[in-house]
Amino acid sequence: MGACPHYNEPVARICILGGTGFVGQVLAARLAARGHRIRILTRQRFRHRDLLVLPGLDLVQADIHDKRTLGRHLEDMDAVVNLVGILNESRARHQTFRAAHTALAETLSSLCRTHRIPRLLQMSALGADRNARSQYLRSKAEAEASLFLTPDAAAVTSFRPSVIFGPGDHFVTGFARLLRLAPYCFPLACPDSRFAPVYVGDVAERMCDSLDDWSTHGRAVPLCGPDIYAFQELVELIADMAGLRRKVIGLSPRLSRLQARVLGLAPGRPFTMDNYHSLQIDSVCEDVPPCPTHLEPVMRAALAPR
């Protein structure tokens, strides 16, 4: 591999925040296969000890929102990958968009400068915009800004994927789970919203490749798959792949907002007004070559009835 700026050896020691999640586990495996030494910080080490099978991986229990603790674990790193993100806020500690996205990015920027860490990869979202009505999309854009605009900080690449799919994902697998619970009809908010789902393996490869790719420094990189679906079309496909006969009923804007208000009060907050605002922006790429992997072959095999 080539050299990173301000560092005259190949990237070798990489700390991943959010490394126990869906994308993080795939990325850690790809980085380990390339010979890197990986450190993953997690709140509950005992729940993720299966990751220790990866060669050169160090799994550390730590509070990433404590700046002193985080700094101690970043001291000897050559690169940091921040995959931390939430889709909905809760009353739990650090589970606000400000804390999970913006404040953590600001802390990372400061620590990378202090410890002279040359490279930082940030997971953002397609549609991130500081003027967005969605707090999720707004906080993702604010996090990017805090990283890109900090002088003398690490070389940053931000990734803006559409919805990410793969076996065990949150989106496709999650909707298959919800469809199984529906007796026959499935009311769907914002049915005309569009997505270009991108495969988790393609996302991980692009992140790995970017570590020593100078052309990605200081850039926000959109990531989309080769197929574009309307939301209703995609949920109907998920039902078909899972072998479920369900009638997906697209809701009007008024009923979509009503559903968001009601479900935003339900346990677990499965759909909120902030989710509704996010869905007003199509999650597709414009004039960008897509990642290669198609959704249907991968997820039909993953969702097929056993």
Image: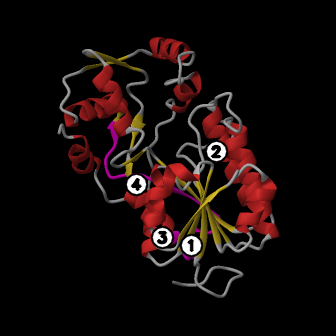
Dot 1, how many residues are within 10 Å of its Cα: few (below 14), some (14-19), or many (20+)? Answer: few
- Does residue 108 sit above or below 78 in this rendering? above
Question: Which residue bears the numbered disc 1?
Answer: 215
Q: Kindly identify the residue that appears in the image at 72 percent across and 41 percent down.
A: 99
Distance from Cα at disc 3 to Cα at disc 2 = 25 Å
The magenta span reads 210-229
Horizontal side of 267 relative to 306 (left or right) equals right
Residues at marks 1 and 3 touching, judged by CB atoms closer than 8 Å: no
Three-letter amino acid code at disc 1?
Answer: Ser
Say what secondary structure mark 1 lies in. Answer: helix
Q: From the viewer's perspective, is the residue at label 1 or at label 2 nearer?
A: 2
Residue 225: say if magenta: yes
Horizontal side of 96 relative to 36 (left or right) equals right
Q: Which mark is residue 140?
A: 2
Q: From the viewer's perspective, is the residue at label 4 or at label 1 nearer?
A: 4
Dot 4, how many residues are within 10 Å of its Cα: few (below 14), some (14-19), or many (20+)? Answer: many
* Residue 301 in view here: yes
Question: Which residue bears the numbered disc 3?
Answer: 31
Residues at marks 3 and 4 touching, judged by CB atoms closer than 8 Å: no
Q: Who is closer to the viewer here, 128 or 286?
A: 128
Horizontal side of 306 relative to 276 (left or right) equals left
Three-letter amino acid code at disc 3?
Answer: Leu
Q: Who is closer to the viewer here, 34 or 252?
A: 34
Q: From the viewer's perspective, is the residue at label 2 or at label 4 nearer?
A: 4
Question: Which residue bears the numbered disc 4?
Answer: 200
Residue 179: say if magenta: no
